[in-house]
Amino acid sequence: MRRPGMDPAGEPQKKPVPKAKSNERAPRLTRAQRTKDTAATEARKALREATRQRKAFERDEMRRFTAHLRRRRITLLAILGSVVALAIFVGVGVFSPLMALQIVRVNGTHRVDGMVIERDLASQIGRPLPLVDTNAVRASLAKQPLVKSFSIQSIPPHTLVVNVVERSPIGYLATTHGFSLVDPAGVSIELTPTKVRSYPVIGVAGGSPTSAGFPAAVSVLLSLPSSVRTRITEVQAQSTDNVVLLMQGSGAKVVWGSAEQSALKATVLAALMRKYPARSSSVYDVSSPSSVVVR
């Protein structure tokens, strides 16, 4: 027989657990418990915020560090690229026939024969522009006494331009070897047995540009207007304070004195010559430009 409280298998029968009533309320927390619960919640929030800020800081630091590396890498690549490009450019310019010289052009020549210079530099044809021999150019122009200075300009891909500044003759010096045509610096441009150009003779001691009177004579000639200068056949300057001009054709004489106030004296002389045309016996004394004499 089954005992009371036993199931058919002979095991003790479990008593059913009574269900809680649906309208039974949760136990009310005390004020201290609520305060403790609120503090725990705030602590968790603070911990989460601190964790978020730390991760954000780590991300910013990583981004900043990698940005520095990126900039450094970009800079290195740019430098490397520039070096490679320069090497290619130099290689093409120096060793490639693409930049070979084909044309030599001479500018600024009036009395100098530019064709002579071009023919003299024909040996440079075919060379790369950067390898043109400047010493050869200098040697070629040194053969031209009328060349005062020059400059070289390379115009890729095939042109070399030689810009020439010619010497400007100012007059002749009478020497024991003939007449030496000189520029204002006293550099001899050409030496001929007789005068072959319409420049005045500069009469100075010894016929030398180192004479004391030479700078005074040059200063006077440069101050004259072209209308008067072309009529001067001789400038006598045996000293710096006694410059005399002799005029072509009429044989008139101009007493100039020193080279001081040359610009004013030139203006006064031009006015006197318009008012008193030169005759064979004319003498224009402008040594004191504020008190001139014509006789």
Image (tube, rainbow, N blue to C red):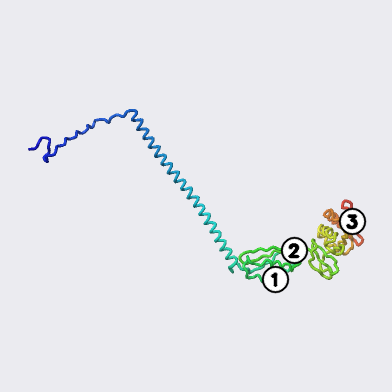
Asked if residue 267 is positioned above or below residue 19 in the image, the reply reads: below
Which of the two discs, 1 and 3, sits closer to the camera?
1
Q: Residues within 10 Å of mark 1 (few under 14, many from 20)?
A: some
| Residue assigned mark 1 | 120
Residue 77 relative to residue 106: left or right: left
Above or below, comparing residue 77 to residue 56 in the picture:
below
Residue 46, located in which quarter of the rendered image? top left
Q: Earlier in the sequence, mark 1 or mark 3?
A: 1
The residue furthest left is: 1
Please say if 152 is above or below 44: below
Instruction: Name the residue beneath numbered marker 3.
Output: 285
Residue at label 2? 148
Closer to the N terminus: mark 1 or mark 2?
Answer: 1
* Other-residue count near label 2 (Cα within 10 Å), few / some / many at <14 / 14–19 / ≥20: some
Q: Are marks 1 and 3 in contact (CB under 8 Å)?
A: no
- Tell me the SS state at disc 1: helix
User: Earlier along the polypeptide chain: callout 2 or callout 3?
Assistant: 2
Q: Is residue 228 visible?
A: no
Residue 277 location (% of width, % of height)? 88, 59
Q: Residues within 10 Å of mark 3 (few under 14, many from 20)?
A: many
Q: CA distance from mark 1 to mark 3?
A: 51 Å
The image quarter containing residue 186 is bottom right
Q: Residue furthest top?
A: 31
The percent coordinates of residue 118 (x first, y second) are 69, 69
In front: 21, or 107? 21
Q: Amino acid at mark 2?
A: Lys
Residue 244 in picture, x, y percent from top left:
88, 59
Badge 1 amino acid: Asp
Q: Is residue 166 left or right of residue 129?
A: right
Residue visible at 89% across and 56% down in the picture: 285
